[in-house]
Amino acid sequence: MSRIFRIAGLSILCMPICYALGGEVADRPNIVMIFSDDQRFDAVGYTGNEAIQTPNLDHLARSALVFTNCFVNTSICAVNRANVLTGQYPARHGIDDFHKTFTSVQLEESVPGRLQAAGYQTAFFGKWGVGDSPENTHAGAAVFDYWAGQPKQTNYFHESDCRYVNFNGFTRPLDDLCDCPEDSRGTAGHEVRIGRENLVDPIHVDSQVTPLHVQRFLDGRDQSRPFCMLLFFKSPHGPMGDWDPALADAIDSSKIMLPAAATSANAQREPDIVKESLGWSPERLENPGQFTRHIEDYYRSIASMDLGVGRVMDHLKQRGLAENTVVLFTSDNGYFTGEHGLKGKWLMYEPSLRVPGFLYDPRVNRGQSSDRLIITTDFSVTMLALAGIDVPESMTGRNLSILITNPEADWRQDFFYDHPYGHGGRIPRTLGVRNLTYSYTRYIDPSPPFEQLFDLQVDPDQLNNLIENSEYSDLLDELRKRCDQLAAEVGPIP
Protein backbone atom coordinates (compact mmCIF):
# COMPACT_ATOMS: atom_id res chain seq x y z
CA MET A 1 0.00 0.00 0.00
CA SER A 2 1.22 3.52 -0.76
CA ARG A 3 1.87 5.68 2.22
CA ILE A 4 2.24 9.36 2.84
CA PHE A 5 4.96 10.86 4.99
CA ARG A 6 6.18 14.37 5.67
CA ILE A 7 9.49 15.80 4.48
CA ALA A 8 10.52 19.45 4.80
CA GLY A 9 6.99 20.51 5.61
CA LEU A 10 5.34 18.89 2.61
CA SER A 11 3.45 15.63 2.27
CA ILE A 12 4.89 13.21 -0.26
CA LEU A 13 3.39 10.15 -1.87
CA CYS A 14 5.88 7.32 -1.68
CA MET A 15 5.25 4.67 -4.31
CA PRO A 16 6.27 1.30 -2.86
CA ILE A 17 7.12 -0.32 -6.17
CA CYS A 18 8.38 0.95 -9.48
CA TYR A 19 6.05 3.12 -11.49
CA ALA A 20 3.86 1.33 -13.98
CA LEU A 21 5.01 0.89 -17.55
CA GLY A 22 2.46 0.08 -20.23
CA GLY A 23 -0.19 -0.67 -17.61
CA GLU A 24 1.90 -3.25 -15.76
CA VAL A 25 4.15 -2.90 -12.76
CA ALA A 26 7.75 -3.36 -13.81
CA ASP A 27 10.04 -5.92 -12.22
CA ARG A 28 12.65 -4.51 -9.90
CA PRO A 29 15.32 -2.98 -12.12
CA ASN A 30 19.05 -3.04 -11.68
CA ILE A 31 20.35 0.34 -10.47
CA VAL A 32 23.55 2.19 -11.32
CA MET A 33 24.38 5.41 -9.47
CA ILE A 34 27.09 7.54 -11.10
CA PHE A 35 28.50 10.05 -8.61
CA SER A 36 31.31 12.34 -9.78
CA ASP A 37 33.49 14.60 -7.65
CA ASP A 38 33.60 18.41 -8.11
CA GLN A 39 31.65 18.49 -11.38
CA ARG A 40 29.89 21.81 -11.91
CA PHE A 41 26.49 21.90 -13.61
CA ASP A 42 27.74 22.94 -17.06
CA ALA A 43 30.84 20.72 -17.25
CA VAL A 44 29.29 18.09 -19.51
CA GLY A 45 28.53 18.07 -23.20
CA TYR A 46 24.75 17.64 -23.06
CA THR A 47 24.36 21.05 -21.36
CA GLY A 48 25.69 22.71 -24.53
CA ASN A 49 29.32 22.89 -23.46
CA GLU A 50 31.26 22.63 -26.72
CA ALA A 51 34.69 22.62 -25.07
CA ILE A 52 34.33 19.15 -23.55
CA GLN A 53 33.66 15.69 -24.97
CA THR A 54 31.41 13.45 -22.88
CA PRO A 55 29.77 11.24 -25.52
CA ASN A 56 28.68 8.50 -23.12
CA LEU A 57 26.93 10.72 -20.60
CA ASP A 58 25.46 12.67 -23.53
CA HIS A 59 24.10 9.45 -25.04
CA LEU A 60 22.35 8.53 -21.79
CA ALA A 61 21.04 12.07 -21.34
CA ARG A 62 19.36 12.06 -24.74
CA SER A 63 16.93 9.40 -23.48
CA ALA A 64 16.88 10.51 -19.84
CA LEU A 65 14.98 12.90 -17.63
CA VAL A 66 17.58 15.68 -17.33
CA PHE A 67 17.42 17.96 -14.30
CA THR A 68 18.28 21.55 -15.16
CA ASN A 69 17.96 22.75 -11.55
CA CYS A 70 19.95 20.11 -9.70
CA PHE A 71 21.65 21.09 -6.43
CA VAL A 72 23.57 19.65 -3.49
CA ASN A 73 22.53 19.52 0.16
CA THR A 74 26.15 20.23 1.17
CA SER A 75 28.94 21.36 -1.16
CA ILE A 76 31.84 19.23 0.04
CA CYS A 77 32.73 15.65 -0.82
CA ALA A 78 32.78 13.79 2.54
CA VAL A 79 29.56 15.25 3.92
CA ASN A 80 27.56 15.08 0.72
CA ARG A 81 28.66 11.49 0.13
CA ALA A 82 27.25 10.74 3.56
CA ASN A 83 24.10 12.60 2.50
CA VAL A 84 23.53 10.45 -0.58
CA LEU A 85 24.38 7.20 1.21
CA THR A 86 21.94 7.88 4.07
CA GLY A 87 19.34 10.06 2.36
CA GLN A 88 19.81 12.53 5.20
CA TYR A 89 21.26 15.94 5.99
CA PRO A 90 24.39 16.14 8.20
CA ALA A 91 22.40 17.30 11.23
CA ARG A 92 20.75 13.86 11.19
CA HIS A 93 23.53 11.48 10.13
CA GLY A 94 26.25 13.33 12.06
CA ILE A 95 29.03 13.24 9.43
CA ASP A 96 30.30 16.82 9.43
CA ASP A 97 34.00 16.33 8.66
CA PHE A 98 36.39 13.93 6.93
CA HIS A 99 37.03 11.69 9.92
CA LYS A 100 33.67 10.75 11.44
CA THR A 101 32.17 7.55 10.15
CA PHE A 102 28.92 5.60 10.21
CA THR A 103 27.87 3.29 13.01
CA SER A 104 26.93 -0.27 12.10
CA VAL A 105 23.27 0.63 12.61
CA GLN A 106 23.58 3.62 10.26
CA LEU A 107 25.10 1.39 7.61
CA GLU A 108 22.27 -1.12 7.94
CA GLU A 109 19.76 1.73 7.56
CA SER A 110 21.61 3.39 4.68
CA VAL A 111 20.48 3.20 1.07
CA PRO A 112 22.85 0.32 0.18
CA GLY A 113 22.06 -1.40 3.49
CA ARG A 114 18.33 -1.32 2.79
CA LEU A 115 18.84 -2.45 -0.81
CA GLN A 116 20.98 -5.36 0.33
CA ALA A 117 18.42 -6.38 2.96
CA ALA A 118 15.72 -6.30 0.26
CA GLY A 119 17.58 -8.81 -1.88
CA TYR A 120 19.69 -6.57 -4.08
CA GLN A 121 23.29 -7.53 -4.66
CA THR A 122 25.22 -4.36 -3.88
CA ALA A 123 28.59 -3.22 -5.22
CA PHE A 124 30.75 -0.17 -4.56
CA PHE A 125 33.50 1.24 -6.76
CA GLY A 126 35.84 4.20 -6.27
CA LYS A 127 36.11 6.95 -3.69
CA TRP A 128 34.22 6.17 -0.48
CA GLY A 129 35.21 9.47 1.13
CA VAL A 130 33.57 8.96 4.55
CA GLY A 131 35.88 8.38 7.49
CA ASP A 132 39.15 8.88 5.57
CA SER A 133 41.20 6.06 7.14
CA PRO A 134 41.50 2.54 5.70
CA GLU A 135 39.73 1.13 8.76
CA ASN A 136 36.78 3.50 8.48
CA THR A 137 36.61 3.02 4.74
CA HIS A 138 36.57 -0.76 5.05
CA ALA A 139 33.71 -0.50 7.55
CA GLY A 140 31.51 0.63 4.65
CA ALA A 141 32.02 -2.71 2.92
CA ALA A 142 29.63 -4.31 5.43
CA VAL A 143 26.65 -3.39 3.24
CA PHE A 144 28.21 -4.30 -0.11
CA ASP A 145 28.51 -7.76 -1.63
CA TYR A 146 31.33 -6.51 -3.86
CA TRP A 147 33.80 -3.91 -2.60
CA ALA A 148 36.18 -1.89 -4.79
CA GLY A 149 36.51 1.24 -2.69
CA GLN A 150 39.64 2.99 -1.51
CA PRO A 151 40.31 5.39 1.39
CA LYS A 152 41.16 9.08 1.48
CA GLN A 153 40.96 10.78 -1.93
CA THR A 154 41.90 7.58 -3.81
CA ASN A 155 44.49 7.80 -6.58
CA TYR A 156 44.14 8.32 -10.30
CA PHE A 157 46.94 6.02 -11.42
CA HIS A 158 47.71 2.47 -10.36
CA GLU A 159 50.20 -0.12 -11.49
CA SER A 160 48.46 -2.82 -13.50
CA ASP A 161 49.57 -5.40 -10.92
CA CYS A 162 48.47 -3.23 -7.97
CA ARG A 163 46.75 -5.14 -5.17
CA TYR A 164 43.67 -2.89 -5.43
CA VAL A 165 43.36 -3.40 -9.17
CA ASN A 166 43.51 -7.18 -8.93
CA PHE A 167 41.59 -7.77 -5.71
CA ASN A 168 38.36 -9.72 -6.11
CA GLY A 169 35.79 -7.56 -4.35
CA PHE A 170 33.66 -10.55 -3.35
CA THR A 171 36.48 -11.74 -1.08
CA ARG A 172 36.42 -11.30 2.68
CA PRO A 173 38.37 -10.36 4.70
CA LEU A 174 39.45 -7.37 2.64
CA ASP A 175 43.06 -7.21 1.53
CA ASP A 176 42.65 -4.58 -1.14
CA LEU A 177 44.70 -1.50 -0.24
CA CYS A 178 46.72 -0.01 -3.07
CA ASP A 179 50.40 -1.03 -2.87
CA CYS A 180 51.77 1.12 -5.70
CA PRO A 181 55.32 2.50 -5.41
CA GLU A 182 56.22 6.01 -4.32
CA ASP A 183 55.49 9.01 -6.50
CA SER A 184 58.04 11.79 -7.03
CA ARG A 185 57.25 13.18 -3.58
CA GLY A 186 57.87 9.91 -1.80
CA THR A 187 54.18 9.08 -1.22
CA ALA A 188 53.22 5.46 -1.78
CA GLY A 189 50.23 3.12 -1.77
CA HIS A 190 46.79 4.39 -0.84
CA GLU A 191 48.10 7.74 0.40
CA VAL A 192 47.37 10.56 -2.03
CA ARG A 193 49.86 10.23 -4.88
CA ILE A 194 50.35 12.52 -7.87
CA GLY A 195 51.25 11.49 -11.39
CA ARG A 196 52.53 8.29 -13.00
CA GLU A 197 56.19 8.52 -12.09
CA ASN A 198 57.72 5.20 -10.99
CA LEU A 199 54.78 3.22 -12.41
CA VAL A 200 55.81 0.73 -15.10
CA ASP A 201 52.34 0.04 -16.55
CA PRO A 202 50.03 2.76 -15.17
CA ILE A 203 46.28 2.48 -15.65
CA HIS A 204 43.66 5.12 -14.84
CA VAL A 205 41.24 4.52 -11.98
CA ASP A 206 38.13 6.01 -13.62
CA SER A 207 38.57 5.01 -17.24
CA GLN A 208 40.14 1.58 -16.66
CA VAL A 209 40.19 0.28 -13.07
CA THR A 210 36.53 0.89 -12.20
CA PRO A 211 35.28 -0.74 -15.45
CA LEU A 212 37.59 -3.69 -14.72
CA HIS A 213 36.06 -4.14 -11.27
CA VAL A 214 32.56 -3.76 -12.74
CA GLN A 215 33.34 -6.54 -15.20
CA ARG A 216 34.54 -8.73 -12.31
CA PHE A 217 31.37 -8.03 -10.34
CA LEU A 218 29.02 -8.69 -13.25
CA ASP A 219 30.75 -11.95 -14.11
CA GLY A 220 30.65 -13.20 -10.52
CA ARG A 221 27.29 -11.92 -9.34
CA ASP A 222 24.26 -13.95 -8.37
CA GLN A 223 22.21 -13.75 -11.57
CA SER A 224 18.99 -14.53 -9.71
CA ARG A 225 19.14 -11.18 -7.89
CA PRO A 226 18.87 -7.58 -9.07
CA PHE A 227 21.91 -5.44 -8.35
CA CYS A 228 22.85 -1.90 -7.41
CA MET A 229 26.24 -0.52 -8.38
CA LEU A 230 27.47 2.74 -6.83
CA LEU A 231 30.13 4.23 -9.11
CA PHE A 232 31.79 6.95 -7.01
CA PHE A 233 34.30 8.37 -9.48
CA LYS A 234 37.25 10.51 -8.40
CA SER A 235 37.05 12.76 -11.46
CA PRO A 236 37.29 15.68 -11.81
CA HIS A 237 38.76 16.27 -8.32
CA GLY A 238 42.44 17.26 -8.26
CA PRO A 239 45.24 16.69 -8.93
CA MET A 240 44.04 18.13 -12.21
CA GLY A 241 46.82 16.83 -14.42
CA ASP A 242 46.11 13.17 -13.67
CA TRP A 243 43.71 12.46 -16.52
CA ASP A 244 43.89 9.46 -18.84
CA PRO A 245 46.51 10.30 -21.51
CA ALA A 246 44.17 8.86 -24.14
CA LEU A 247 41.91 11.88 -23.57
CA ALA A 248 44.50 14.55 -24.33
CA ASP A 249 42.51 15.68 -27.37
CA ALA A 250 39.06 15.37 -25.79
CA ILE A 251 38.66 19.14 -25.46
CA ASP A 252 38.43 22.21 -27.65
CA SER A 253 40.49 24.89 -25.95
CA SER A 254 39.15 27.57 -28.27
CA LYS A 255 35.70 27.10 -26.72
CA ILE A 256 36.87 27.58 -23.11
CA MET A 257 35.65 30.91 -21.79
CA LEU A 258 36.17 32.64 -18.47
CA PRO A 259 32.74 33.27 -16.91
CA ALA A 260 31.65 36.85 -17.59
CA ALA A 261 31.27 37.58 -13.88
CA ALA A 262 34.74 36.20 -13.04
CA THR A 263 36.58 39.52 -12.88
CA SER A 264 39.05 41.04 -10.44
CA ALA A 265 36.65 43.93 -9.86
CA ASN A 266 33.86 41.56 -8.83
CA ALA A 267 36.24 39.55 -6.65
CA GLN A 268 37.22 42.65 -4.73
CA ARG A 269 33.56 43.40 -4.00
CA GLU A 270 33.24 40.21 -1.97
CA PRO A 271 32.68 40.55 1.78
CA ASP A 272 35.63 39.91 4.08
CA ILE A 273 34.25 36.55 5.19
CA VAL A 274 34.57 35.32 1.58
CA LYS A 275 37.95 36.99 0.97
CA GLU A 276 39.36 35.29 4.05
CA SER A 277 38.02 31.86 3.13
CA LEU A 278 39.74 28.90 1.55
CA GLY A 279 39.62 29.19 -2.22
CA TRP A 280 39.60 32.96 -2.65
CA SER A 281 42.42 33.58 -5.13
CA PRO A 282 41.61 36.52 -7.42
CA GLU A 283 45.17 36.58 -8.75
CA ARG A 284 44.24 33.64 -10.96
CA LEU A 285 41.95 35.96 -12.89
CA GLU A 286 44.96 38.03 -13.98
CA ASN A 287 46.46 35.07 -15.85
CA PRO A 288 44.06 33.86 -18.55
CA GLY A 289 46.56 31.30 -19.81
CA GLN A 290 46.81 29.67 -16.39
CA PHE A 291 43.02 29.61 -16.13
CA THR A 292 42.67 27.96 -19.54
CA ARG A 293 45.22 25.27 -18.69
CA HIS A 294 43.39 24.55 -15.44
CA ILE A 295 40.04 24.12 -17.20
CA GLU A 296 41.65 22.01 -19.93
CA ASP A 297 42.85 19.57 -17.26
CA TYR A 298 39.49 19.74 -15.47
CA TYR A 299 37.62 18.84 -18.67
CA ARG A 300 40.08 16.07 -19.59
CA SER A 301 39.49 14.55 -16.16
CA ILE A 302 35.73 14.56 -16.77
CA ALA A 303 36.31 13.02 -20.19
CA SER A 304 38.33 10.27 -18.48
CA MET A 305 35.37 9.49 -16.25
CA ASP A 306 33.05 9.55 -19.24
CA LEU A 307 35.21 6.94 -20.95
CA GLY A 308 34.79 4.78 -17.85
CA VAL A 309 31.02 5.29 -17.97
CA GLY A 310 30.98 4.11 -21.56
CA ARG A 311 32.94 0.98 -20.70
CA VAL A 312 30.59 0.19 -17.83
CA MET A 313 27.58 0.58 -20.11
CA ASP A 314 29.26 -1.70 -22.67
CA HIS A 315 29.68 -4.37 -19.99
CA LEU A 316 25.96 -4.13 -19.22
CA LYS A 317 24.97 -4.35 -22.89
CA GLN A 318 27.24 -7.30 -23.60
CA ARG A 319 25.51 -9.25 -20.82
CA GLY A 320 21.98 -8.31 -21.84
CA LEU A 321 21.49 -6.19 -18.71
CA ALA A 322 21.23 -2.67 -20.08
CA GLU A 323 17.50 -2.72 -20.86
CA ASN A 324 16.57 -3.34 -17.23
CA THR A 325 19.18 -1.09 -15.62
CA VAL A 326 18.24 2.39 -14.42
CA VAL A 327 21.10 4.90 -14.35
CA LEU A 328 21.19 7.93 -12.08
CA PHE A 329 23.87 10.60 -12.40
CA THR A 330 24.91 13.61 -10.36
CA SER A 331 27.94 15.06 -8.55
CA ASP A 332 28.88 15.58 -4.91
CA ASN A 333 29.33 19.34 -5.39
CA GLY A 334 29.82 22.05 -7.97
CA TYR A 335 32.98 24.01 -8.69
CA PHE A 336 34.06 27.64 -9.02
CA THR A 337 35.94 28.71 -12.13
CA GLY A 338 36.80 32.21 -10.96
CA GLU A 339 33.36 33.48 -10.03
CA HIS A 340 33.61 35.71 -6.93
CA GLY A 341 37.40 35.28 -7.18
CA LEU A 342 37.00 31.71 -5.96
CA LYS A 343 38.22 28.23 -6.79
CA GLY A 344 36.99 25.02 -5.15
CA LYS A 345 33.45 24.87 -3.74
CA TRP A 346 31.98 25.06 -0.19
CA LEU A 347 30.12 28.39 -0.29
CA MET A 348 26.44 28.85 -1.15
CA TYR A 349 27.00 30.57 -4.47
CA GLU A 350 25.41 28.99 -7.54
CA PRO A 351 28.57 27.54 -9.18
CA SER A 352 29.29 25.61 -5.96
CA LEU A 353 25.68 24.62 -5.38
CA ARG A 354 24.55 23.50 -8.83
CA VAL A 355 25.49 20.14 -10.34
CA PRO A 356 24.47 18.08 -13.38
CA GLY A 357 21.92 15.34 -12.95
CA PHE A 358 19.67 12.93 -14.79
CA LEU A 359 17.56 9.80 -14.40
CA TYR A 360 17.85 7.33 -17.29
CA ASP A 361 15.31 4.52 -17.34
CA PRO A 362 15.47 2.43 -20.53
CA ARG A 363 12.05 0.95 -19.73
CA VAL A 364 10.62 4.39 -20.44
CA ASN A 365 13.20 5.64 -22.96
CA ARG A 366 12.06 9.19 -23.49
CA GLY A 367 14.21 12.28 -23.57
CA GLN A 368 12.89 15.16 -21.52
CA SER A 369 14.01 17.76 -19.01
CA SER A 370 12.68 19.11 -15.74
CA ASP A 371 13.33 22.46 -14.10
CA ARG A 372 12.09 21.30 -10.69
CA LEU A 373 14.38 21.90 -7.70
CA ILE A 374 16.30 18.64 -7.24
CA ILE A 375 18.67 17.87 -4.35
CA THR A 376 21.23 15.14 -3.67
CA THR A 377 19.03 13.15 -1.30
CA ASP A 378 16.35 12.83 -3.98
CA PHE A 379 18.70 10.36 -5.66
CA SER A 380 18.87 8.38 -2.40
CA VAL A 381 15.10 8.12 -2.10
CA THR A 382 14.74 7.29 -5.80
CA MET A 383 17.03 4.28 -5.52
CA LEU A 384 14.82 2.84 -2.77
CA ALA A 385 11.61 3.67 -4.63
CA LEU A 386 12.87 1.99 -7.80
CA ALA A 387 13.55 -1.14 -5.75
CA GLY A 388 10.06 -1.12 -4.23
CA ILE A 389 11.37 -0.31 -0.75
CA ASP A 390 9.35 1.90 1.59
CA VAL A 391 11.19 5.16 2.17
CA PRO A 392 11.60 5.83 5.92
CA GLU A 393 10.64 9.14 7.49
CA SER A 394 14.28 9.59 8.53
CA MET A 395 15.19 10.30 4.89
CA THR A 396 14.78 13.69 3.23
CA GLY A 397 14.11 13.49 -0.47
CA ARG A 398 11.62 12.76 -3.22
CA ASN A 399 11.18 10.01 -5.76
CA LEU A 400 12.49 11.46 -9.03
CA SER A 401 10.84 8.77 -11.15
CA ILE A 402 7.46 10.37 -10.42
CA LEU A 403 8.54 13.26 -12.67
CA ILE A 404 8.87 10.89 -15.64
CA THR A 405 5.23 9.85 -15.61
CA ASN A 406 3.86 13.07 -14.11
CA PRO A 407 6.02 16.10 -14.99
CA GLU A 408 3.52 18.40 -13.29
CA ALA A 409 3.55 16.52 -9.97
CA ASP A 410 3.48 18.61 -6.81
CA TRP A 411 7.08 19.39 -5.86
CA ARG A 412 9.19 21.44 -3.47
CA GLN A 413 9.42 25.19 -3.96
CA ASP A 414 12.63 25.61 -1.98
CA PHE A 415 15.37 23.59 -0.32
CA PHE A 416 17.74 23.83 2.63
CA TYR A 417 21.54 24.12 2.38
CA ASP A 418 23.81 23.06 5.24
CA HIS A 419 27.62 23.22 5.21
CA PRO A 420 28.78 22.34 8.74
CA TYR A 421 32.47 21.74 8.04
CA GLY A 422 34.71 24.67 8.96
CA HIS A 423 38.18 23.24 8.24
CA GLY A 424 39.69 24.92 11.28
CA GLY A 425 38.10 28.26 10.46
CA ARG A 426 39.26 28.32 6.83
CA ILE A 427 35.79 27.57 5.43
CA PRO A 428 32.90 29.68 6.76
CA ARG A 429 30.11 27.41 7.96
CA THR A 430 26.79 28.21 6.33
CA LEU A 431 23.07 27.51 6.33
CA GLY A 432 20.65 28.76 3.76
CA VAL A 433 17.51 28.52 1.68
CA ARG A 434 17.31 28.56 -2.09
CA ASN A 435 13.95 28.86 -3.82
CA LEU A 436 12.93 29.54 -7.40
CA THR A 437 13.74 33.24 -7.16
CA TYR A 438 15.93 34.02 -4.15
CA SER A 439 18.97 32.70 -2.37
CA TYR A 440 19.44 33.38 1.36
CA THR A 441 22.75 32.51 3.07
CA ARG A 442 23.58 32.66 6.78
CA TYR A 443 27.24 32.47 7.79
CA ILE A 444 26.90 31.11 11.31
CA ASP A 445 30.40 31.64 12.76
CA PRO A 446 30.34 35.46 13.19
CA SER A 447 28.26 36.98 15.97
CA PRO A 448 25.83 38.19 14.83
CA PRO A 449 25.74 35.94 11.74
CA PHE A 450 26.66 37.48 8.41
CA GLU A 451 23.88 37.18 5.82
CA GLN A 452 23.41 37.44 2.08
CA LEU A 453 20.24 37.76 0.02
CA PHE A 454 20.23 37.60 -3.77
CA ASP A 455 17.49 37.97 -6.36
CA LEU A 456 18.49 35.27 -8.81
CA GLN A 457 16.22 36.49 -11.57
CA VAL A 458 17.75 39.96 -11.85
CA ASP A 459 21.16 39.11 -10.36
CA PRO A 460 22.05 35.52 -11.38
CA ASP A 461 25.75 36.13 -10.68
CA GLN A 462 24.95 37.06 -7.05
CA LEU A 463 26.83 40.33 -6.98
CA ASN A 464 24.28 42.59 -5.26
CA ASN A 465 23.59 41.63 -1.63
CA LEU A 466 20.09 42.87 -0.71
CA ILE A 467 20.38 42.37 3.06
CA GLU A 468 20.51 46.10 3.78
CA ASN A 469 17.78 46.98 1.28
CA SER A 470 14.66 47.89 3.25
CA GLU A 471 12.43 46.95 0.32
CA TYR A 472 13.30 43.31 1.03
CA SER A 473 12.87 43.36 4.81
CA ASP A 474 9.64 41.34 4.79
CA LEU A 475 11.12 38.77 2.43
CA LEU A 476 14.24 38.59 4.57
CA ASP A 477 12.19 37.86 7.69
CA GLU A 478 10.30 35.17 5.79
CA LEU A 479 13.47 33.47 4.56
CA ARG A 480 15.09 33.63 8.00
CA LYS A 481 12.09 31.83 9.46
CA ARG A 482 12.03 29.35 6.60
CA CYS A 483 15.72 28.59 7.14
CA ASP A 484 15.09 27.86 10.81
CA GLN A 485 12.04 25.75 9.97
CA LEU A 486 13.90 23.62 7.42
CA ALA A 487 16.89 23.22 9.75
CA ALA A 488 14.57 21.79 12.39
CA GLU A 489 12.86 19.48 9.92
CA VAL A 490 16.04 17.83 8.63
CA GLY A 491 17.59 17.41 12.08
CA PRO A 492 17.34 14.53 14.57
CA ILE A 493 14.29 12.27 14.45
CA PRO A 494 12.62 12.22 17.94
Image (cartoon, rainbow, N blue to C red):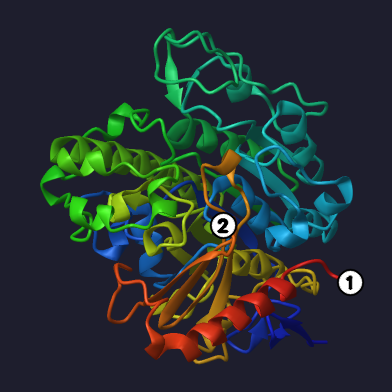
The extreme left residue here reads 254
Q: Cα distance, mark 2 to mark 1? A: 30 Å
**Label whose residue precedes the other's in the sequence (2 or 1):** 2
Quadrant of residue 116 within the rendered picture: bottom right
Q: Amino acid at mark 1?
A: Pro
- In the image, residue 37 sits, relative to residue 157, either above or below, namely below
Q: Which residue is mark 2?
A: 446
- Mark 2, residues whose alpha carbon is within 10 Å: few (<14), some, or many (≥20)? few
Circle 1: element type: loop
Q: Position of residue 422 (x, y in %)?
A: 59, 46
Residue that carries the numbered disc 1 in the rendered image: 494
Res. 223 in view? no
User: Residue at coordinates 59% horizontally, 82% vertically from top-left?
Assistant: 402
> Residue at the location (58% across, 64% down)?
448
Give residue 321's position: percent from left, percent from top.
57, 56
Q: Quadrant of residue 436?
A: bottom left
Quadrant (top left, top right, bottom left, bottom right) of the C terminus: bottom right
Say which of 103 and 309 sits in front.
Answer: 103
